[in-house]
Image (tube, coloured by chain):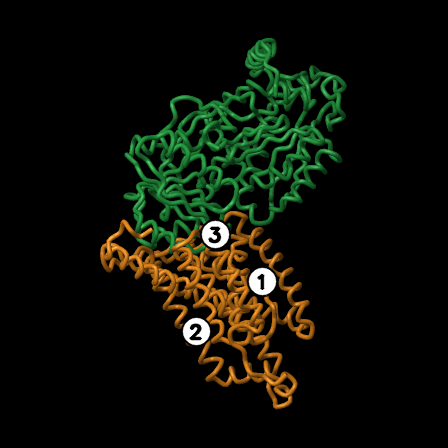
Amino acid sequence: MAEHDEAGHSRLRRQILMGMAAAPLAGLLPKTAFAQAPATSAVNTTGLAVTDTEVTVGILHSATGTMAISETGSIQAEKLAIEQINAMGGVLGRKIKFIQEDGASDWPTFAEKAKKLLVQDKVAAIMGCWTSASRKAVLPVIEQYNGMLYYPTFYEGLEQSKNVIYTGQEATQQILESLNWVVKEKGAKTFYFIGSDYIWPRTSNKIARKHIENFMKGTKVVGEEYFPLGHTQFNSVINKLKLTKPDVIFTDVVGGSNVAFYKQLKAAGINLDKQILMTISVTEDEIDGIGGENIAGAYSCMKYFQSLDNPNNKEFVAAFKKMWGEKTVIGDVTQAAYLGPWLWKMTVEKAGSFDVDKIAAASDGIEFTKAPEGYVKIHANHHLWSKTRVGLAQKDGQFKVVYESPDLIEPNPFPKGYQ
Amino acid sequence: MFGEYSLGDLGSIFAMQGFAGLILFSVYLLMALGLAIIFGQMGVINMAHGEFMILGAYVTWLTSVFFTEHLPSLFPIYFFVAMALAFCASGALGMLVEWALIKRLYKRPLDTLLATWGLSLILQQVYRSVFGPREVGVTLPDWMMGSLPVTDVVEVQINGLFVMGLTLLITVAVFFMIFRSRFGQQIRAVVLNRQMAGAVGIDTEKVDRLTFGLGCGIAGVAGSAFTMIGSTGPTAGQLYIVDTFLIVVFGGAASLFGTIASAFSISQTQSTLEFFLSGSMAKVITLLTVVGILMLRPQGLFTLKVRR
């Protein structure tokens, strides 16, 4: 992991101050900015695709196949961030050029394209992957060829790599605070888990179960169910819900199943205004398909909602809609994907180099004060410090934030007592 | 598992569970009917069946948008218009595909598998380019959502009743068309012996095209109905295709009764197991049972007695 040195910190502070002082001038003097750019030989000692005027990064998501539904937002956010960074003068005086590859919702394809980006295109960093399966497929490639990956999705944790920055939340960050909230505020005692059958829901539910059974008093899990990906018939489990009458339905169902689940829940007469339902898998993106009227009243635990009321977010939402259309919605992962290019830029500037080893070492402590979610900081374990929020789904497809954790939550990808 | 519940509660739950099984049966049958006609009667392995369904779903979505913007007063009944349009759209596309692609491959049945699989990929990408990669939300009229309370616990889903009614209607219509109409006689004649049927004056090409169009049209109606219970996205058709083939093959490809019997047995097994076990286990056991039975009886549950 990154070495923790005091010198690095004060250097960072100095650079932020310098950057702030220089910001008003940068727009006026683009030419001088180039003239001041450090020599390529100095900032790129490992043969990456960096020239005197350009640096190349890769974007690796599924633009086709079943995951395109989810990954489109991430691609859009990354392109927006790159455009904005370029408008401000780029990174170390170099404009960012991106090469976009399509992972096609197929995990071996992700690995192959990652190798192509690293070996053939020599990209300085990759913004990409979405599902845990694609990340797991890409990880050995990234480590073998020593690349840098910025991964946007909230995920199950239990992973840490020098070559990856996780810009989404790991499971404990997303779940624990929200469970505390629902128990304290709503007096919930019993929980029923329903998830899609793969690693993320199973690990997340395991963490939630440990928390409910070991760390809270008088609460228990009364049911736990998994359905194959793409399952569209939930009537039987809905009957079980009616029989067991849990205080909270806790769900991590994904993809097309999500739509079927909420539509059938509503059709079966389960009123989400009375029945508490808490999900960790539904963002504004998913509501588009589910339909706001079918899910209104459900609670979602995320670090970001489009409706967050802060100046950074207002600016971000306006810029996003200007680039991609009034009707687009922004979910948690889209925002996390937007952080990737920015965090990379700031790390490169702190390290004063595009070299992957130097970036990996310099990542610890990087702060992004203009993040739409408010403020984030990279932890030594390459995850982000972030706040957790609970949003109440509205008919118009947006969330109303009903709870926000008071402090930044420390990322803890290997939680003790939860495995 | 049931110790802590009262007898009344259990009774209600079993009533609801029975109803859930019937809904699943209707959904499966509706999915499979179109394919039963195409695969069963014509022997064409149509891998693009799910995409024809999704075309119906997209037509429903377009209709709902149109009604919201131009005819809001008629919105409560738009769904019927949408289903008719879905039938026409999927049917028309089916006939076009038959004319352009399938008819050249009747002598090479395995190649139709590859060709229609390619077609399904093409259609998925077309949907993605036209409608965008994200799912679209189909708004339903209020009267179709929610449920009718029978007792405190027993509630009957309106959209479940709707799907059951629709399935019944279409099954009866298909039955009469195949077994009681002149057109059905022609279809069966062509299935049994193409050359003889041609020799006695049946326009076999026309019959083929209409049969394929009919099967696709029914798929379109099914897709339209499924906007009530499932998602509408470019690849949503893939969610249905495995179950659909399973039902048609298990029932005995050439038999409509077989399809009904197989949809019934699979849906009841699945729904009961899901209640007593978990979702994934239910699927595993159902599939294993089907595989086991097909090993003993490769021709499926029911077969036509045909001189080969």
The three-letter code of the residue at mark 2 reads Thr
| Depicted A392 relative to depicted A215: above or below | below
Chain letter behind tag 3: B
Which colour is chain A painted?
Answer: green
Residue B189, percent from left and from top:
57, 84
**Which quadrant holds the N terminus of chain A?**
top right
Tint of chain B: orange
Q: Is residue B17 or residue A94 the one in the foreground?
A: B17
Question: Which residue type carries mark 1?
Answer: Ala
Q: According to the image, label 2 marks what residue?
A: B171
The residues tagged by marks 2 and 3 sit, at their Cα atoms, a distance apart of: 30 Å
Q: Which residue is mark 3?
A: B280
Q: Which residue is mark 1?
A: B48
Q: Are marks 1 and 2 on the same chain?
A: yes
Of the pair B144 and B280, the residue shown nearer to us: B280
SS class, disc 3? helix
Number of other residues with Cα within 10 Å of mark 3, as a class: few under 14, some 14 to 19, many 20 or more: some
Q: Amino acid at mark 3?
A: Ser
Q: Position of residue A354 (x, y in %)?
A: 68, 22
Dot 2, crowdedness within 10 Å: few (<14), some or many (≥20)? some
Q: CA distance from mark 3 to mark 1?
A: 26 Å
Q: Is residue A134 left or right of residue A354?
A: left
Residue at image location 50% in from the left, 33% down from the top: A335
Q: B43 left or right of A290?
A: right
Q: Which is closer to the viewer, label 2 or label 3?
A: 3
Sequence-earlier tag: 1 or 2: 1
